[in-house]
Amino acid sequence: STENFMEYQKELKPISDKYYALLEKIEKDWSTLYNLKEYTGTLAQKVEKECIDAINYFKKMHAIDIKYGESSPQNIPAFRRLAMLYERQGKYESSVDVCKQAISLDMDERARMLRMIKKAGRTPTDEEMKLINNE
């Protein structure tokens, strides 16, 4: 119903506004970080915090979507950027964890997760194999 949709929008908008504004900052800062090839330091810490904040906003939006029977986006750039940042910092296990979170929210980060596991020099656990094989 229209009333239900208006209620959904009213609840979602304050969070989605912050989320999308943060995504713009992440992309701008990532571009600077990428061009400088400086994946540690102040800017890298800023991007990491922005990604974590955006992921938290996304999780809130996702909960609202579920509450109102709406579907959430399956492309969540903050997960991708955070996983890439951790990869470039050599924090492969942290990158794997980010991929697992993304997968739990229906984002397909299986290929990246498998790459990070290989870079970490280990074999996937049974649980990870289930995620990779989409079971």
Image (cartoon, rainbow, N blue to C red):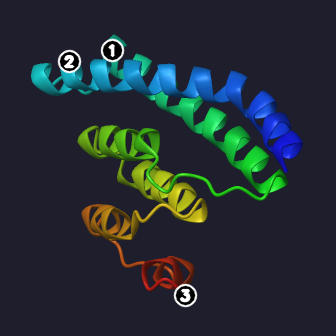
Question: Which image quadrant is residue 58 in?
Answer: top right
Q: Which mark is residue 32?
A: 2
Which kind of residue does numbered mark 1 sit on?
Leu
Which residue shows up at 69% across the image and 40% down it?
A: 61
Which kind of residue does numbered mark 3 sit on?
Glu
Residue 123: give x, y in percent of width and height: 37, 79
User: How many numbered dots are placed on residues in this image?
Assistant: 3
Q: Nearer the viewer, residue 99 or 64?
A: 64
Which of labels 1 and 2 is toward the front?
A: 2
Which kind of residue does numbered mark 2 sit on?
Thr
90 to the left or right of 131: left
Work out which residue is located at the far top of the displayed protein and give it.
Answer: 42
Which residue shows up at 39% across the image and 70% down it?
A: 110
68 to the left or right of 120: right
Mark 1–mark 3 Cα distance, whole angstroms, equals: 38 Å
Residue 36: give x, y in percent of width and height: 12, 19
Q: Which mark is residue 135?
A: 3
- Is residue 36 placed above or below 59 in the rendered structure? above
| Residues at discs 1 and 2 in contact (Cβ within 8 Å) | yes
Element under disc 1: helix
Q: Which residue is mark 1?
A: 43
Which residue shows up at 41% across the image and 51% down it?
A: 95
Question: Which image quadrant is residue 60 in?
Answer: top right
- Is residue 34 placed above or below 130 in the rendered structure? above
In the rendered structure, which disc, 1 or 2, sits on the residue that comes first in sequence? 2
